[in-house]
Image (cartoon, grey):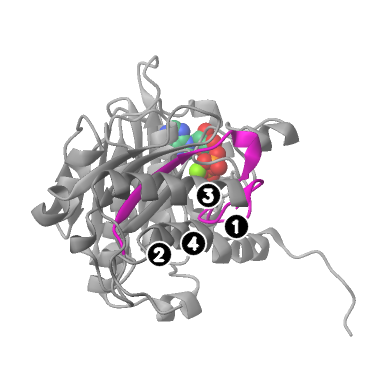
Amino acid sequence: MPRIRQLPPDVVTKIAAGEVIERPASVVKELLENSIDAGATRIDIDLDAGGTELIRIVDDGCGIDPDDLALAFSQHATSKLETADDLFRIGTMGFRGEALSSIAGVGQITLQSRTHAAASGCEVKCDGGALSDARPWNGTPGTRLEVRHLFYNVPVRKKFLKSVATELGHVCETVTRLALAHPTLHITLRHNNRLVYDIPASAGLTDRIALFFTGEVRDALYELDSGAGPLRLTGFIADPKCDRGNSKLQYLFVNGRWFRDRSVAHALQESFRGLLMSGRYAIGFLFLTVPPDKVDVNVHPTKSEVRFQENSLIYSLVRSTIKHRLLKENLVPHLTVPQ
Ligand code: ADP
Ligand code: MG
């Protein structure tokens, strides 16, 4: 056995990037989350070749102070967390301070940013972890981040990327999730200079649902609200007549963050028991509000899984709220379900 040694920083960065950055859609997710945390009202996304050649995100958020630009690329450097206790009252999308350093380890970045108070902004480039000196930049307030040649220095990862259409599909799904959770954001997505999405700021979730999904779904929505309380469920389900052959239209959010959860998805399905044929899936856009100290979002580097302190309470809340709503529509189980 060789002796134990400390890995060099560039290897550490690549290992960390492996967890957070799997494909272009992961970069888009991290950058969109940063723009949202920066208070952006408009975000423009440009991609070339499914994001493998270029990902450009421009926002009108608060911008980054020139003195902080270099620090933004260091590992575990964040403006969103100070103490370990803060981990249990997270109100921002990001907090791990890993995204920019990870992306910089596997792509070529140009970051341009200007705060609203400053007369001009700054630009830095980061190539394979090597940071350039800051240069003045005279763009409009906000942040403009370009990532070129993703995985140019990690050939194994590059090989795992799928076709341009598949990678673009993943980006579209990422944008859909964030747009559903943030209806007041104006988001555009261009691919190879062609407009894919122009999602205007809208008053609410129904507008967003109507934009992304068919009229049939929009016209069959039932609103959910479990009522005020420390745990709350709001959102929409669709009439069982709009059932689907897969669970893709089951969108789960907790405190404004999209997440994946078998138990909540099961509660949604269970509420429709007797109303759907076997192998069919309900449509749901479920928004949970949970006190931040009762949900751990720091379970996985991509923050797409969470752990609830009171899992069974959440399960019953989802199940009973949806069941009551269906009953209100006189939708009572009528299918014979095998015991
Ligand atoms: P995290 O989001 O977890 O803090 P990141 O690596 O994603 O970590 O970003 C590091 C820091 O860079 C953020 O904490 C934030 O201060 C700053 N930053 C990144 N993107 C933006 C942006 N679009 N607008 C303003 N500040 C940003
Ligand atoms: Mg972030």
In primary-sequence order, the first of circles 2 and 3 is 2
Q: Which residue occupies 22% across, 55% down?
A: 239
Q: Position of residue 233 (x, y in %)?
A: 43, 40
Q: Is residue 239 visible?
A: yes
Residue density around tag 3, few if under 14, some if 14–19, many if 20 or more, within 10 Å: few
Task: Determine contact: label 2, label 4, CB under 8 Å.
Answer: yes
What's the CA distance linking mark 4 and mark 1? 12 Å
Front-most of residues 4 and 232:
232
Q: Is residue 333 above or below residue 316?
A: below
In primary-sequence order, the first of circles 4 and 1 is 4
Does 227 sit left or right of 327 as displayed?
right
Give the SS element for disc 3.
helix
Amino acid type, mark 3: Ser
Look at mark 3 in the image and give the residue it sits on.
316
In primary-sequence order, the first of circles 1 and 3 is 1
Amino acid type, mark 2: Leu
Q: Quadrant of residue 194?
A: bottom left
Task: Determine contact: label 2, label 1, CB under 8 Å.
Answer: no
Q: Nearer the viewer, mark 4 or mark 1?
A: 1
Look at mark 2 in the image and give the residue it sits on.
150
Query: Per the image, is 283 magenta?
Result: yes
Look at mark 4 in the image and give the residue it sits on.
21
Look at mark 1 in the image and give the residue it sits on.
300
Q: Nearer the viewer, mark 2 or mark 3?
A: 3
What's the CA distance linking mark 2 and mark 3? 43 Å
Q: Which residue occupies 26% across, 54% down?
A: 331
Q: Is residue 119 above or below residue 247?
A: above
What's the CA distance linking mark 3 and mark 4? 35 Å
Residue density around tag 2, few if under 14, some if 14–19, many if 20 or more, within 10 Å: many
Q: Position of residue 196 (x, y in %)?
A: 15, 55
Is disc 3's CB within 8 Å of ligand 1? no
